[in-house]
Amino acid sequence: MATRKSFQIVHEFAAGADLSTKQFRFMEWDGTDVDPCNAITDLPVGVLQNKPDAAGKSAEVLMIGGTKMVAGAAITAGALLGTDDEGRAVPIVAGTDTTQYILGRALSAASGAGIIISAMVDCVAIPRAA
């Protein structure tokens, strides 16, 4: 008989600012606090799960596992994901840009930016898109 288990690693960081509008986006960590990724070359620590409304408040960041994500462009189910300059999930093609990181895979599709999708992410063992 097959069974299904959920596996997630969530870590608590300090928010670097009001992140109440940044839920389900990739976050970068500067060694002190987290803020949304602001370049496609950023190396995220994970995906923000809650809505901390001030700097220093608890930011719950999913590092590995299934999560909702805000799309930054149209995405097909199964696409490899990277970050855009607002921490949103965007499709990337391995071998096309050696500056981007493969951060996960889309489990559902998005017709465009701002749509919430399901994704599986791994922000611990991250390969480059090359």
Image (cartoon, grey):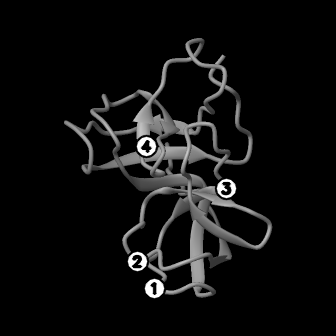
**The furthest residue to the right:** 31
Of residues 40 and 130, which is closer to you in this image? Answer: 40
Residue contact between numbered discs 1 and 3, judged by CB atoms under 8 Å? no
Where residue 111 sits in the image (x, y, percent)?
Answer: 19, 36
Instruction: Find residue 89 and name its label.
Output: 4
Using the image, tell me which numbered label, if any, was put on residue 20: 2
Q: Dot 3, how many residues are within 10 Å of its Cα: few (below 14), some (14-19), or many (20+)?
A: many
Q: Is residue 15 left or right of residue 107?
A: right
Q: Is residue 18 above or below residue 22?
A: below
First in residue order: circle 4 vs circle 2: 2
Write down the quadrant of residue 90 in the picture.
Answer: top left
The residue positioned 66% from the left and 16% from the top of the image is: 130
Q: Is residue 72 above or below residue 61?
A: above
Q: Is residue 56 found left or right of 53 in the rendered image?
A: right
Circles 1 and 2: CB distance less than 8 Å?
yes
Name the residue carrying label 1. 53
Element type at marker 3?
loop
Discs 2/3, front: 2
The CA distance from mark 1 to mark 3 is 20 Å
Q: Of circles 4 and 1, which is in front?
A: 1
Q: Earlier in the sequence, mark 2 or mark 3?
A: 2
Q: Which mark is residue 45?
A: 3
Please name whichever residue, 100 or 126, is drawn nearer the observer in this view of the structure: 100
Q: Residue at x 46, y 57 (%)?
A: 25
How far apart are labels 2 and 3 at the CA level?
Answer: 18 Å
Residue type at mark 4: give it.
Answer: Ala
Q: Which mark is residue 130?
A: none
Sequence-first tag of 1 and 3: 3
